[in-house]
Image: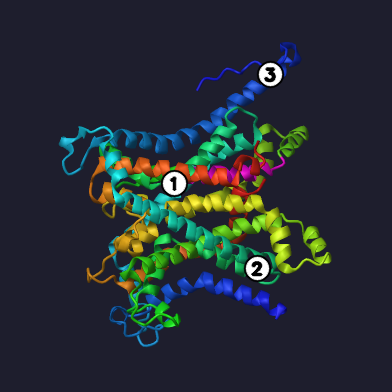
Amino acid sequence: MTTTIATPATKAGDIPPEVSDRTRAENRLGMKLVAPALIVMLVVTAFPILRALWLSFYNYSLTAPEDRQFVGIDNYVTALTDSLFWRDIGMTVIYMLVTVAFELVIGFAFAMIMHRVIFARGVIRTSILIPYGIITVVSGFAWQFAFTYQNGFVNGWLPFVSADFNWFGDTVPAVIAIMVSEIWKTTPFMSLLLLAGLAQVSEDMIEAAKVDGATWWQRLFKVILPNMRAAIMVAVLFRALDAYRIFDNIFVMTAGAQGTESISFLTYRQSIEQFQLGMGSALAVLLFLSVLLVAFVIVKLFRVDLAQARGES
Amino acid sequence: MRKLALPLGVALVMVWCLLPIAWIVSLSFKSQDAVSNGTDPGFLPLDSFTGWDNYTAVWDDDQFRRSILNSIGISLIATILSVALATLAAYAIARLEFKGKRFVLSTALAIAMFPVVSLVSPLFDLWRIFGLYDTWPGLIIPYMSFTLPLAIWTLSAFFREIPWELEQAAQVDGATAWQAFRKVIVPLAAPGVFTAAILTFFFAWNDFVFGITLTSTEAARPIPAALSFFVGPDPFQRPAGLLAAAAVIATIPIVIIVLLFQRKIVAGLTSGAVKG
């Protein structure tokens, strides 16, 4: 990367030469230090995604690699006109909306408790970090075994469910089971981000509202929540994009059966299980584009400027 | 009533967080027979307690031991490489004024949001061509794609808090540049680097998608992938007891890290994302 320092728009005489030398040196050092990380990130993501873009225009199956032929946008047409693709996109959006909504509510309740609690701080923080640190696959297994009717405890504990109810026999209950696992695993992350936001709300303001006679709910909705808007937006953005990629729990708990498949799962199934690399690549590109779209919608909806939220600009 | 709300809340949080863990520990002590026939459906292994049988059986399994080793090795190497590169980048971002700073941060953010599965099919193809399929480097390289952004964000937030003027102050007091860096800056930066390393390790240890798609044998298969392919003696029935024991073993390192460093982990998680 060659860079020439743009001459400032102001008159040349304004800036003493030694400062501009120093700026130039700093600029060069900064780029040098950043370069390795940047190159690695681009090589492991940009390069494969460009290759996926190229492969997506071919009919390319690993079972018959010699028959690879250029088919133009056929793969995209097939995917976009297939109801399976749209059903999986819909399923993914449902996973995202429901899990993030629950995580926001539960995570906020957790954050409030952690914020107010004076005793046992370490214990509660440790327990809340356990789901965050645990392998998603392990959480998937734990919840799958909990929901199975042969040996799980869920049916026995829920009064409105019969003892031999098969959670994995139909779409809705299977999706609920997957969502429970997903929510359990990722709520801690949400609650920690919200806790950080909560810490930034000034106690004085809450006290003032209290003195003025505001009820608990009024204080919550009129004082606390509006003042931690930035933290909530960042948490929702992070979690929503993460939830959109849902894969591990589905793989472990249903392997995509009963219509629980997400768009990530469909992409995986096409490319790795069925060796259709051309079609799989087209789906990978579509997945990538749909994530961009989701990110764009959320950012527009919330008007978040992440760099600004961190004071980077 | 009001006084009870908080302790009750604390108890609820703990039950919610630890219930599935307690459940998987309980399962790991149940006999396979009781689990698959549903003769002991309660939470605790009352009628079907088998002691350490499941644990010894899992530990005697060569593939399981091998996958634990793979996970530790691959995650550690990926963590060290990521944190080393991220430290350089974060130092530049926090301390220097240079063009493209914002670009690096936004690239890192964009990549953190990247759907990992879309990298899978091109990497699967490329790795077979380059001979990286089913090898340690074949996993370490893709792991860097999602651990680097995390490490860069966490570290740059940490480094911005460091009072860099201290370094100059030490030099004014007669320390050489290297001494000032080593004696003043390194002790201040080390906790942040360490925290970033823990979070990076969690990420790598948790990976599943690359683990199942870029490996085919125990040569490189990490523990989450190995768990999901773990079949046991009866291919039609998941060996719940054995799986649970394996899962508990795979979870122990994480629990130890959390117990030891919970304060640091919380600081790292929140500073990377929200600290302004």
Whole-angstrom CA distance, mark 2 to mark 3, is 53 Å
Residue on which the image places disc 3: A20
Numbered badge on residue B201: none
Which of discs 3 and 1 lies nearer the camera? The answer is: 3
The residue carrying pointer 2 sits among few (fewer than 14), some (14 to 19) or many (20 or more) residues within 10 Å by Cα, namely many
Image-based side of B230 in relation to A288, left or right: left
Q: The C terminus of chain B is located in which quarter?
A: top right
Residue drawn at x 75%, y 15% as measured from the top left: A14
Circle 1 residue: B78
What distance separates the C-alpha of mark 3 from that of mark 1?
39 Å
Question: Measuring 60% from the left and 55% from the top, which residue is drawn there?
Answer: A193
The spot of residue A198 in percent (x, y) is 68, 58
Q: Residue A181: x and y, percent?
A: 44, 65
* Residue A38: image location, x then y, percent: 49, 34
Is the residue at mark 2 from the same chain as the one at mark 3? yes
Where does the image place residue B95, in percent across and percent down from the top left?
A: 65, 35
Going from the N terminus, do you reach mark 2 or mark 3 first?
A: 3
Query: Looking at numbered disc 1 in the image, what kind of residue is underneath it?
Result: Ala
From this viewpoint, is residue B64 visible? Answer: no
Respond whether the residues carrying marks 1 and 2 are from the same subunit: no
Q: Does the magenta segment cover residue B18?
A: no
Chain letter of disc 2 in the image: A
Q: Residue at 26%, 66% (x, y): give it.
A: B231
- Front in this rendered view, residue B240 or A64: A64
- Res. A71 visible in picture: yes
Query: Which numbered dot is residue A113?
Result: 2
Residue type of the residue flagged with mark 2 = Ile
Mark 3 nearby-residue class (10 Å; few <14, some 14–19, many ≥20)? few
Letter of the chain that mark 1 sits on in the rendering: B
Image: magenta residue range: B147-163
* The one of A300 and B203 positioned closer to us in this rendering: A300
